[in-house]
Amino acid sequence: MLEEIPENDDETYIDVIDKRLEKNSEIDLETLGKFAKKIVEETAPSKRPLEMNVILLDPEDISALNEKHLSKSGPTDVLAFPIDEPGDETDGHVYLMGDVCICIEVAERQAEEKGLNFEDEIALLLTHGILHLLGYDHHEESTEVEMKKMEKILIERHVKHLRVNDV
């Protein structure tokens, strides 16, 4: 279960957009946005105002993005599309982090395979996507270790009862 996150009035803007045609799973968009905001505020290197989008997609839509941008076929769980580079400071301008796209159907299947509840899987995928927006990657062993370490810290801090070693 995601931790309740209090509202605050800073200048972090997270837009959660559900673009699925068939909404077979109910998603609490407000809670998802609050969770994303908490992760972003803890990890973003910039103290300037920032914006990002979380986009929930059908398998067909994420497959098209996966093919177009990564030359991979089929649906994937999460894709991240950064806009501004982390740490690229421009006084007075909003830091446009980018978009995290999550395929809900793939997340449901993975949650079942891992023995997790659906919300926990979404939290894992969203955290993973946000870290990609911040420049983390897993293309090499050294950067993968660093990314997994940060995922573990964030998940254990912000998702009640879930330990990354469990997944």
Image (cartoon, rainbow, N blue to C red):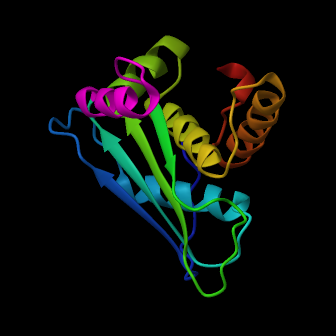
Q: Determine if the magenta segment contains residue 75.
A: yes
Task: Give the residue furthest to the top.
Answer: 113
Residue 50 x %, y %: 56, 71
Residue that appears at 81% across and 29% down? 145
Task: Identify which residue, 28 or 90, lies in the foreground.
Answer: 90
The number of callouts visible is 0
Residue 166 x %, y %: 69, 20
Q: Determine if the magenta segment contains residue 72.
A: yes
Residue 163 vertical position relative to residue 100 in the rendered view, above or below: above
Residue that appears at 36% across and 54% down? 29
Q: Quadrant of residue 30?
A: bottom left
Residue 51 vertical position relative to residue 160 in the rendered view, above or below: below
Residue that appears at 74% across and 22% down? 165
Q: Quadrant of the C terminus?
A: top right
Task: Identify which residue, 25 or 67, lies in the foreground.
Answer: 67
Part of the protein shown in magenta? 59-77
Residue 78 vertical position relative to residue 71 in the rendered view, above or below: below
- For the stretch drawn in magenta, the main secondary structure is helix
Task: Give the residue furthest to the left.
Answer: 21
Task: Give the residue furthest to the bottom.
Answer: 92
Task: Identify which residue, 73 or 51, lies in the foreground.
Answer: 73
Residue that appears at 50% across and 61% down? 34
In the rendered structure, the answer to whether residue 88 lies left or right of residue 96 reads right
Residue 129 x %, y %: 55, 42
Residue 133 x %, y %: 59, 50
Q: Quadrant of the N terminus?
A: top right
